[in-house]
Image (cartoon, rainbow, N blue to C red):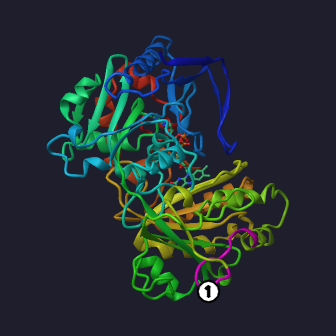
Amino acid sequence: MPIVNINPAATWVNHHQNVSQAYDRLYDVFNPNVDTPDFMTDLQPTISALEGIIGDAINDQKRLRALGGGWSLSTAAVTDGRLINTQNLNWRFPIGAGGVSTGYPGDPSLLMYMQAGMSVAVANNALFEQTRQQALKTSGASNGQTMAGAFSTGTHGSRFQFGAMQDYVVALHIIAGPGRVLWLERASYPVLRDDIVAGVGAQLIRDDTIFNSALVSFGSFGIIYGIVIETEPLYLLEEERHLLPLDARLRQAMLTLDFSGIPTPHPGETPFHFDVVVNPHNPAGGAYVTTMYQRPYHTGYPPPEVSSSGLGPGDDLLAVVGKLGDVAGLIVAPLVNALVTSQYSQFGPGTPKPAQVGTPGEIFFSTVTLQKEMSAEIGVALGDTLRVLDLMLGLPEVKDYPGLLAFRWVKGSKALLAFTRFDTTCTIEFPAAYADNTMAYYNAVWRGLEAAGIPYTLHWGQINNFTPARVQAMYGAAANHWVVSRNAVLDPPARAVFTSPFLQSCGLG
Ligand SMILES: Cc1cc2nc3c(=O)[nH]c(=O)nc-3n(C[C@H](O)[C@H](O)[C@H](O)COP(=O)(O)OP(=O)(O)OC[C@H]3O[C@@H](n4cnc5c(N)ncnc54)[C@H](O)[C@@H]3O)c2cc1C
């Protein structure tokens, strides 16, 4: 039997301590204690328990939401009612050739069913297992999110020829209410055999619009219980970081993703990952350019360095900036300059430190304790990258902004509400100290973009300025299709339960 612990009313706080939410109940849900779980039989008891939790919320007229890892800096993860801790739901099952629909176009040996509460860190380990030797196609900078929590807000890295995490999810196993367990796939991309879907007690809905709506839906389509992802044969990433002048050549690379004009460790070879970090207090000092190249997996490489403070070689800038601490009343430019010099080192050819090599799980790794800090992130079209950079550096509020500007790029997503919605989206993150000046700068950037008429989106899981009008401006008809899909998936009582204040503030509920 699954175990469901009901914690009494209290206050939940996210990892970065910028969101707190009073709740009526917090459920901790555990799988039954089974040595070798069976896909066809052992998923059911926990599903029934979760159906019961939704039924209770309907009867008690309480709102309900699944929590992931609690890493979001927005209120997307919470609601003014009951919360479910999903982090103990982390079983996994390979699918294999016998399990797929005849129309499935991919390689079945690379398909993996994961329960939704599996953390990115555990997913990396699970895929790495010696017999399997697979890897996630991409993830965020670090690894504390759950798989469902991460893609539900559109988490991305900088694999610019691919996309974000939701872009490798090909099936969603969703509990949409008591007696309503759904298996969603795209009609254009069938995955699991119909009889297996029926065998796990789910109703199959193959519909591109509904699937693309549910992918990035921040807890609003019910409880995501499991997902099927497409993985990739295990690979290594070779990572280098160099301080380059923020001159016409680097600007051209940021605008086009054509790297032929800048020095790269492997001229002529397209990197797997490219990102640029600008210190707005010293743009004349150059920008930190990180490149990663995909290499076939082999053993015997020196493991990538983890700093004494627990920072991995990936791009966990938020953890770096957290070291600024309380900046109230201080002049921020020297602090940010000192932080960058001490924490953001160069490595790779031409520097004293060698390139770092590791699996994606080793590169995008972080064990730091999360600090009180802030982060917002916008998405703009690739072609607007430099306009936005110049706008951000030119704002008077930048002088007091205790943070950095981090540029990454990803291909546009099919998910209707993905904030990476431009054909190639340049994502710009603003990791910063927890301070009034940080919020003042965020507001100035948003106002500046709107005044300049530059289309932008916002990361659902970070600090934002959503209003119904802004969500309409960002997503237009896609937002309306998303609402129609949600109405098709959830009946009215379940819809009321999964409508949160955040959703209402976005005009989506
Ligand atoms: C240190 C740090 C680094 C980060 N790096 C990046 C980065 O590189 N790139 C990037 O894009 N973002 C990044 N983020 C943002 C982060 O990836 C997102 O906010 C992500 O959504 C957090 O995932 P989580 O598992 O903590 O989920 P939560 O924050 O707990 O929840 C996120 C959403 O998922 C929903 N959800 C969770 N589980 C379920 C479920 N089972 N069923 C239905 N809904 C569910 C919740 O209701 C909520 O709406 C970073 C955040 C931090 C703190």
**Where residue 215 sits in the image (x, y, percent)?**
37, 43
**Where residue 378 sits in the image (x, y, percent)?**
51, 59
28 horizontally vs 90: left or right: right
Query: Is residue 350 on the magenta stretch?
Result: yes
Nearest the viewer among 264 and 445 is 264
Q: Quadrant of the C terminus?
A: top left
Most distant residue in the right direction: 329
Write the start and end of the magenta stretch as one range: 342-352
Dominant secondary structure of the residues highlighted in magenta in the image: loop
The residue type indicated by label 1 comes to Gly
Query: Is residue 386 on the magenta stretch?
Result: no
Say which element carries label 1: loop
- Residue shown at 45%/40% (left/top)? 148
Nearest the viewer among 372 and 28 is 28
Nearest the viewer among 400 and 372 is 372
Quadrant of the image occupied by residue 159? bottom left
20 horizontally vs 487: left or right: right
